[in-house]
C-alpha cells in the first residue's frame, strides 16, 4: 500500500513491495448494522501520513450481497482531479474484464 517515509529530512513516497491485487483486504458483512458500524469507525480513523498507509483499497461484500471497492486515500497523494482519473481507469479495466476485451 502507499506510504510516506522521512529519510535525512526528506519526505519520500513509495508503494510497498507487497502491493498486489492478491493482498487487498476483502471484507464481508452479515447485517446492515455491522456494516454501518464498521464503515463509521473506519472513516473516522485519521491518516497519519508519516506513520501509516496513505492509500488503501478494500473490496467489500455488503450485507445485501452487493460488491464495492472502497479506497482510503490521503489528500497529499491524490487530489480531486487525480481521484477522478483513478476511478475512470478502474471502471475501464472493469468493463474490459466484464466484456472479455482489452
Image (cartoon, rainbow, N blue to C red):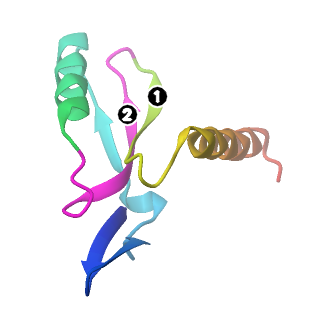
Q: Position of residue 26 (x, y in %)?
A: 34, 43
Question: Residue sitting at 78 percent across and 46 percent down?
Answer: 100
Q: Which stretch did the figure color magenta?
A: 47-64
Circle 2 Cα neighbour tier, 10 Å, few/some/many (<14 / 14–19 / ≥20) = some
Which is nearer the N-term, disc 1 or disc 2? Answer: 2
Quarter of the rendering occupied by the N terminus: bottom left
Q: Position of residue 24 (x, y in %)?
A: 38, 53
Q: Which residue is mark 1?
A: 67
Q: Do tag 1 and tag 2 residues touch (Cβ < 8 Å)?
A: yes
- In this view, the residue farthest toward the front is 9
Residue 20's image quarter?
A: bottom left
Q: Is residue 55 above or below residue 92?
A: below
Q: Is residue 59 above or below residue 13?
A: above
> Is 60 placed left or right of 50 in the picture?
right
> Quick one: 37 or 66, which is closer to the camera?
37
Q: Which residue is mark 2?
A: 60
Q: Is residue 87 above or below residue 55?
A: above
Q: Is residue 52 above or below residue 57?
A: below
> Is 101 placed left or right of 80 in the picture?
right
Question: Residue sitting at 46 percent across and 30 percent down?
Answer: 68
> Is 58 placed left or right of 90 in the picture?
left
Amino acid at each position: 500500500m502507499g506510504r510516506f517515509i522521512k529519510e535525512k529530512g526528506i519526505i519520500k513516497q513509495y508503494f510497498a513491495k507487497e502491493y498486489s491485487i492478491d493482498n487487498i483486504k476483502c471484507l464481508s458483512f452479515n447485517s446492515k448494522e455491522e456494516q454501518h458500524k464498521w464503515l463509521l469507525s473506519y472513516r473516522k480513523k485519521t491518516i497519519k501520513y508519516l506513520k501509516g498507509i496513505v492509500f488503501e483499497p478494500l473490496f467489500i461484500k455488503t450485507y445485501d450481497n452487493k460488491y464495492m471497492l472502497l479506497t482510503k486515500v490521503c489528500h497529499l497523494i491524490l487530489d480531486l482531479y487525480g481521484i477522478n482519473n483513478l476511478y475512470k481507469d478502474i471502471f475501464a479495466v472493469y468493463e474490459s474484464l466484464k466484456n472479455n476485451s482489452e
